[in-house]
Image (cartoon, helix red, strand yellow):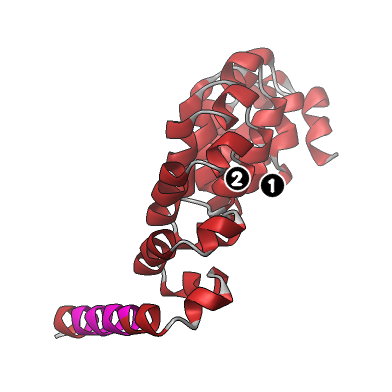
Amino acid sequence: SNTAVIRILPESLSRSMSFLLQAAVAGGSSILRFVAPEFASDKVFVMHVIKSDCTALKHCPKELKEDPSLQLAAVEAGGPQGSAALELAPQALRTDRAFLLRCAKITPQALRLAPEELQKDRSFVMEAVRARGAALQFALFEFRMDHDVVFEAVKQDLGALAFADTSLRHNAKFKEEIAYLQKGIQVSIEVSGE
């Protein structure tokens, strides 16, 4: 790894936060394996490294791995693909309803990675699709057939309709509701674009 060279750098560089952050951007999260312990355990330094690589926390001390704010920053750094960071989160956070719902605003994968009991919880699924309509693709089949859950997802993201059960998509009443919703969205776009 290119970041292993940090071990042989002069102290003036190996102790320079700005140099190490530039190296992190160039070399990724593995830099945390080679920096001095005070950098690997420095929350501010780690936060900067996370911005370059959402999986950086895998190389951090346990106390930083368990920090919800750092884990959320890692998910945010990954954007819609923030699931890579979420998959590395400690089990305590991956079972935390509030944390997962915050993640659902960033990546629809939060629903897929939620524990089974939350995936079966209608109110949790409803909140997840309200936050990110595309989460519907990871909902259990029963929720992809559920009128209210699908409608909430589609209100957030019209594209979520593609993940609804076919019988619901072909239901005349539901199609009418979606058409009305689309008109409302179109009117809203036209009014704000004036």
**Which residue is pictured at 47% across the width and 50% down the height?**
106
Task: Give the dominant element type of the magenta stretch: helix, strand or loop.
Answer: helix
Vertical relation: 88 (above or below) 191: above
Residue 101 image point, x, y percent: 44, 41
Q: Which mark is residue 46?
A: none
Q: Which residues are magenta?
A: 177-189
Horizontal relation, residue 173 to residue 27: left or right: left
Q: Between residues 140 and 80, which one lies in front from this camera angle?
A: 140
Vertical relation: 182 (above or below) 57: below
Horizontal relation, residue 147 to residue 2: left or right: left
Residue found farthest to the right: 1
Visible residue check, residue 40: yes
Q: Which mark is residue 26?
A: 1
Q: Residues within 10 Å of mark 1 (few under 14, many from 20)?
A: few
Q: Quadrant of the C terminus?
A: bottom left
Residue 163 image point, x, y percent: 56, 69
Q: Amino acid at mark 2?
A: Ser
Occupied quadrant, residue 171: bottom left
Asked whether residue 47 is drawn in magenta, I would say no
Whichever of callouts 1 and 2 sits on the residue coming sooner in the sequence is 1
Residue 102 image point, x, y percent: 43, 40
Residue 136 image point, x, y percent: 52, 60
**Which residue is pictured at 33% across the width and 84% down the height?**
176
Give the SS element for disc 1: helix
Mark 1 or 2, closer to the camera: 2
Q: Which mark is residue 52?
A: 2
**Which residue is pictured at 40% across the width and 85% down the height?**
172
Give the SS element for disc 2: helix
